């Protein structure tokens, strides 16, 4: 019998986009994209809450006008307002499609947090569907837009190529770091978008030494 070629991840990858990634068994996404969908659905509820908090501007109605205009500045952050609506719309649309195709009921609570928790239970089904790449792209875009609205200066930073081994093969993912202020309820962390690596600040120093050693070896 002819050998069947391995399935290739159907999503668009930021790093080295022309290089094909092998899809996880039975799925249309690689393991990195599958992990990314889980992370996005975990992060979107608090990102949505931060977007809502960003909607009112600090300027009161009737205060100094916008530069070059005779009209007062609006008391609403229009980008935040638009994204607030878009996040709810996109997530509920995905959930509605899952519910229809699987013959199951949508969550009674239609809030973003509840919809994300419901979708998280169906990630593998989504990743195996013909629309896997589209769903992955929508979730990634929503997360990126949320960071751009709420805190552009603290968006996750690209660290460099991952040097971990996955099944004895070097990971082809990219490392990212999220460094947040003291008192911020969100955790600072380093993670890879292609494997299971995720580190707390307490682990960064030891990991940094290993990372630099492996980078020198591969240079």
Image (cartoon, rainbow, N blue to C red):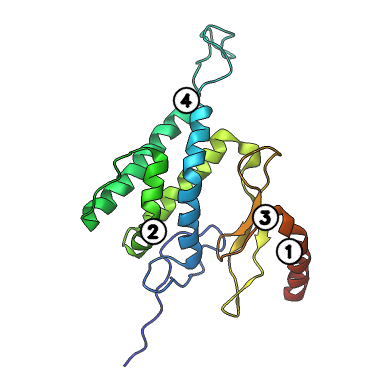
Mark 1, residue position: 207
Q: Which mark is residue 123?
A: 2
Around disc 2, counting alpha carbons within 10 Å, would you say few (fewer than 14), some (14 to 19), or many (20 or more)? some
Mark positioned earlier in the residue sequence (2 or 4): 4
Point out residue 94 in the picture as x, y percentages from the top left corner: 32, 48
Mark 4, residue position: 78
Mark 3, residue position: 200
Of labels 2 and 3, the one closer to you: 3
Secondary element at tag 2: helix
Quarter of the image where one finds residue 124: bottom left
Residue at mark 2 to residue at mark 3: CA–CA distance:
25 Å
Q: In the shown orientation, is residue 94 left or right of residue 69? A: left
Residue at mark 4 to residue at mark 3: CA–CA distance:
35 Å
Around disc 4, counting alpha carbons within 10 Å, would you say few (fewer than 14), some (14 to 19), or many (20 or more)? some
Quarter of the image where one finds residue 154: top right
Residue at mark 4 to residue at mark 1: CA–CA distance:
41 Å
Contact, CB < 8 Å: mark 2 with mark 3?
A: no
Contact, CB < 8 Å: mark 4 with mark 3?
A: no
Residue at mark 2 to residue at mark 4: CA–CA distance:
31 Å
């Amino acid at each position: 019998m002819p050998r069947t070629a391995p399935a290739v991840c159907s999503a668009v990858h930021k790093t080295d986009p022309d290089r094909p990634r092998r899809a996880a068994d039975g799925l249309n996404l690689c393991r990195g994209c599958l992990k990314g969908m889980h992370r996005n659905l975990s992060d979107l509820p608090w990102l949505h809450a931060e977007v809502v908090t960003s909607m009112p501007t600090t300027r009161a109605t009737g205060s100094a006008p916008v530069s070059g205009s005779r009209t007062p500045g609006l008391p609403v952050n229009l980008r935040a307002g638009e994204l607030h609506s878009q996040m709810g719309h996109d997530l509920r649309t995905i959930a509605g499609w899952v519910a229809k195709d699987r013959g199951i009921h949508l969550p009674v609570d239609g809030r973003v947090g509840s919809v994300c928790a419901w979708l998280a239970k169906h990630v593998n089904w989504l990743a195996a569907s013909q629309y896997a790449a589209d769903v992955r792209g929508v979730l990634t875009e929503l997360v990126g837009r949320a960071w751009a609205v709420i805190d552009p200066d603290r968006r996750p930073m690209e660290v460099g190529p991952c040097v971990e081994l996955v099944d004895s093969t070097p990971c082809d993912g990219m490392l990212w770091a999220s460094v947040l202020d003291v008192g911020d309820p969100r955790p600072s962390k380093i993670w890879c978008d292609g494997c299971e690596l995720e580190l707390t600040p307490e682990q960064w120093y030891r990991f940094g030494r290993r990372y630099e050693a492996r980078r020198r070896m591969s240079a």
